[in-house]
Image (tube, helix red, strand yellow):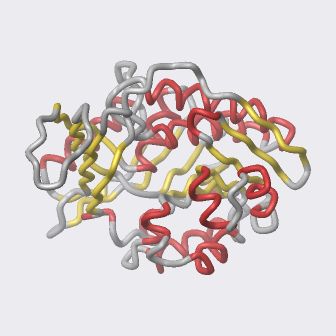
């Protein structure tokens, strides 16, 4: 059976839903809650809760947040490491959600910083590696994550890469990120990120341009659905799932999990439409509630 290795951050999300536009310097009432977060942890939770065996490389602080997050992974059926980093707190993200369900995020990586080869399990147990861009962008983690990529490539483990948001990609610059892309097998990103990395506004043309770097490109288009293309297969597109949008936090992670769940079984480019359809399905489930993890009761 296929098993996915997820590498990236695990975070505590502190979400404030305002229901109105923010005004600088003005007190704004909000509904505040906490949930498990972090791109890689979210992807792992969606995969495991939907029946795909998954292992998450984790680093948390010696605090209540870290213990809570690891316990939550157990409830979702995610296998994981248990590295506790002394002297650092567990990663936290402040998430502000406006009246349209759009979110603005303020992350503090905390104990996530410093990933490296020593954190890896035996790679022979896995058929696919999902890599979030956040640890690559973090200068403390970057050297170790580049070694992880090299190790995965040396054993033929395909890498599905989500490069993270434009806001943090700017920290390293387009040329550096484009060099990273040459080591990836599948690139999953949204329209803004595709525009940023390709310099092309049209998502179809952007996907075609990015195929020069990555064999398979998947672009999430929010309410417009998603598209995908590989070097061996023509462009496919699917619409978004009709739903009431409550909060977009984690929707891209849920989409990635849905895509991987289908793609990992065959790694066949002819399955792209089925893979992005499954991604759209899980993404639609995610935006319909507060939080970046599955709403169904953890097992």
7 above or below 12? Answer: below
Q: Is residue 38 left or right of residue 143?
A: left
Q: Position of residue 53 (x, y in %)?
A: 55, 36
> Where is the N terminus found, in terms of image quarters?
top right
Q: Residue at x 35, y 24 (%)?
A: 298
Q: Is residue 135 left or right of residue 256?
A: left
Q: Quadrant of residue 27?
A: top left
Give the tally of numbered discs.
0
**Relative to the observer, which residue lies in front, 94 or 116?**
94
Q: Quadrant of residue 141?
A: bottom left
Q: Residue at x 59, y 79 (%)?
A: 176
**Relative to the observer, which residue lies in front, 192 or 125?**
192
Q: Quadrant of residue 149?
A: bottom right
Q: Position of residue 111 (x, y in %)?
A: 26, 64
Q: Residue at x 81, y 35 (%)?
A: 271
Q: Position of residue 61 (x, y in %)?
A: 20, 59
275 above or below 117? Answer: above
Give the farthest residue toward the left: 27
Q: Residue at x 72, y 58 (%)?
A: 185
Q: Position of residue 238 (x, y in %)?
A: 72, 31
Q: Is residue 224 left or right of residue 295?
A: right
27 above or below 91? Answer: above
> Where is the C terminus found, in terms of image quarters?
top left
């Amino acid at each position: 059976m296929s098993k996915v290795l997820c590498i990236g951050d695990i975070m505590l999300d502190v979400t404030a839903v305002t229901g109105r536009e923010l005004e600088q310097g003005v007190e704004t009432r909000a509904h505040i809650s906490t949930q498990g977060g972090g791109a890689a942890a979210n992807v792992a939770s969606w995969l495991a809760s939907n029946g795909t065996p998954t292992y998450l490389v984790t680093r948390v602080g010696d605090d209540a947040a870290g213990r809570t997050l690891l316990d939550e992974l157990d409830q979702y059926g995610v296998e994981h490491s248990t590295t506790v980093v002394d002297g650092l707190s567990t990663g936290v993200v402040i998430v502000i959600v406006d009246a349209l369900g759009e979110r603005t995020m303020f992350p503090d990586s905390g104990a996530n910083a410093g990933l490296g080869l020593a954190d890896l399990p035996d790679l022979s147990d896995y058929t696919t590696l999902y890599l979030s861009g956040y640890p690559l962008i973090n200068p403390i983690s970057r050297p170790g994550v580049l070694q992880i990529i090299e190790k995965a490539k040396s054993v033929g483990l395909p890498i599905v890469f989500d490069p993270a948001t434009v806001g943090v990609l700017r920290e390293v610059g387009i040329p550096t990120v484009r060099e990273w892309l040459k080591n990836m097998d599948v690139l999953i990103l949204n329209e803004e990120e595709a525009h940023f990395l390709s310099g092309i506004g049209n998502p179809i043309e952007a996907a075609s341009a990015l195929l020069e770097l990555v064999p398979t490109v998947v672009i999430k288009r929010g309410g417009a659905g998603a598209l995908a293309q590989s070097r061996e297969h023509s462009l496919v597109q699917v619409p978004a799932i009709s739903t009431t949008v409550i909060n977009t936090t984690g929707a891209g992670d849920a989409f990635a999990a849905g895509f991987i769940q289908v793609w990992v079984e065959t790694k066949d480019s002819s399955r792209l439409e089925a893979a992005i359809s499954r991604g759209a399905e899980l993404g639609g489930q995610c935006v319909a509630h507060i939080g970046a993890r599955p709403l169904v009761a953890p097992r």
